[in-house]
Image (cartoon, grey):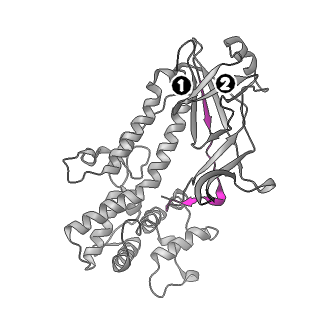
């Protein structure tokens, strides 16, 4: 969901893009933008409707069905549900699955006919399509939390696809967080949702990084901030054909002053026994080749950050001296937590790949580890 739209002040004429979205979704025949009463609409409800509208095609809602869905949505946005008036703010604040139920109920109220199987199919497909961008964002944020100092935490239900707008304590329209939808991960349930099972599995795998013995410094290691690896060129993977053979190659995004660049943050953590981790973090990507997830956010294409080495010095702190005291001799090896066969080695005040290849970071978080006097 586009949270900029969710919290937008629709009365402000400067919010041109958001107001255009309101008109596209809520305007009735004969309405004109210059005379449209934007202040009568809920930005929360518009954001929910926009998230659904962008995912209709992926959910198989097309043709006449899509026309009827947009008609039902327009009625809801204008404060009408099943023939009665209601506060449309609630449409944007309730959980996504219930907002989808509202939409389908309104379609049936308007006279559109679903079979039971058709309705269930639309519910499941649209729910997955709308949640997928948020799920991908949640997983990336969680990997950052796991890699950074502190205790990573999840709100109850996050790994079960719980949604809904909340105030300081509870959802003011529905106590949606009181119910954890265990039936979504129960294979014997009619409401079983495989994509929620995958979310739960992925979240457990991410959180379990902190339980891996070789990554113990993430829990008890003293943190040291490495110098920002700024102005790092972003690369993207492109398909190329040579002599009739297709292969993939990393190429720079843009060139010279027009090359897309980003910063990479490094956090080294060292336990008392000399065990270490290095968390490499970056959250930006190639804006020239991004893909709209359908909710106003973006997801990376096949992009990567290319580094020749990782700087183990920080002239702004006493990090270099601390590292000398704790011991980072020439040849100290680190391994990639995702692939222990990817080995890094200390050379002077730099960390480089042992095989001589450049360091390619294709995730928002890459964790390296060193286990002293043991085989990794």
x and y percentages locating residue 27 in the rendered image: 47, 79
Secondary structure beneath disc 2? strand
Residue at the (52%, 42%) spot, across then down: 141
Q: Is residue 48 magenta?
A: no
Which residue is identified by label 2? 345
x and y percentages locating residue 202 in the rendered image: 41, 41
Nearer the observer, 92 or 67:
67
Residue at the (40%, 57%) spot, across then down: 93
Residue at the (53%, 14%) spot, across then down: 374
In this figure, what is the number of numbered marks? 2
Question: Which numbered dot is residue 218?
Answer: 1
Q: Quadrant of residue 307?
A: top right
x and y percentages locating residue 59 in the rendered image: 37, 65
Secondary structure beneath disc 1? helix
Q: Quadrant of residue 15?
A: bottom right
In this rendering, the label closer to the viewer, 1 or 2? 2
Question: Which numbered dot is residue 204?
Answer: none
**Residue that protrudes farthest toward the front in the picture:** 243
Residue 11, can we see it?
no
Residue at the (58%, 42%) spot, across then down: 364
Whether residue 101 sits left or right of residue 318 in the image: it is left
Q: Which residues are magenta?
A: 277-296
Spatial separation of the CA atoms under disc 1 and disc 2? 20 Å
């Amino acid at each position: 969901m586009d949270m900029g739209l969710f919290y937008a002040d629709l009365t402000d004429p400067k919010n041109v893009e958001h107001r255009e979205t309101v008109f596209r979704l809520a305007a009735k025949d004969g309405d004109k933008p210059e005379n449209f009463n934007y202040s009568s609409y809920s930005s929360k409800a518009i954001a929910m409707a926009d998230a659904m509208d962008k995912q209709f095609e992926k959910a198989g809602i097309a043709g006449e069905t899509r026309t009827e869905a947009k008609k039902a949505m327009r009625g809801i946005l204008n404060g009408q549900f099943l023939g009665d008036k209601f506060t449309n703010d609630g449409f944007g604040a309730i959980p996504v699955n219930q907002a989808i139920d509202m939409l389908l109920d309104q379609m049936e109220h308007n006279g559109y006919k679903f079979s039971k199987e058709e309705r269930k199919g639309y519910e499941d497909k649209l729910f997955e399509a709308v949640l997928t961008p948020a799920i991908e964002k949640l997983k990336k944020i969680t990997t950052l939390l796991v890699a950074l100092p502190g205790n990573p935490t999840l709100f109850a239900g996050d790994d079960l696809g719980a949604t809904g707008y909340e105030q300081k304590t509870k959802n003011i329209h529905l106590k949606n967080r009181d119910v954890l939808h265990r039936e979504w991960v129960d294979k014997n349930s009619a409401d079983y949702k495989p994509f929620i099972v995958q979310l739960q599995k992925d979240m457990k795998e991410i959180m379990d990084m902190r339980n891996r013995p070789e990554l113990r410094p993430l829990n008890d290691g003293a943190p040291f901030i490495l110098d920002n690896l700024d102005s790092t060129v972003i690369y993207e993977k492109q398909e190329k054909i040579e002599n009739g053979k297709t292969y993939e190659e990393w190429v720079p995004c843009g060139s010279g002053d027009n090359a897309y660049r980003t910063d990479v943050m490094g956090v080294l953590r060292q336990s008392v026994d000399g065990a270490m981790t290095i968390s490499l973090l970056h959250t930006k990507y190639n804006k020239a080749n991004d893909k709209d997830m359908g909710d106003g956010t973006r997801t990376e294409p096949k992009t990567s950050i290319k580094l020749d080495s990782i700087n183990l010095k920080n002239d702004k702190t006493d990090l270099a001296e601390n590292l000398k005291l704790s011991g980072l001799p020439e040849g100290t090896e680190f391994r990639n937590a995702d692939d222990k066969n990817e080995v890094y080695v200390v050379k002077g005040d730099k960390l480089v790949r042992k095989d001589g290849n450049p360091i390619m970071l294709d995730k928002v978080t890459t964790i390296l580890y060193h286990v002293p006097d043991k085989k990794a």
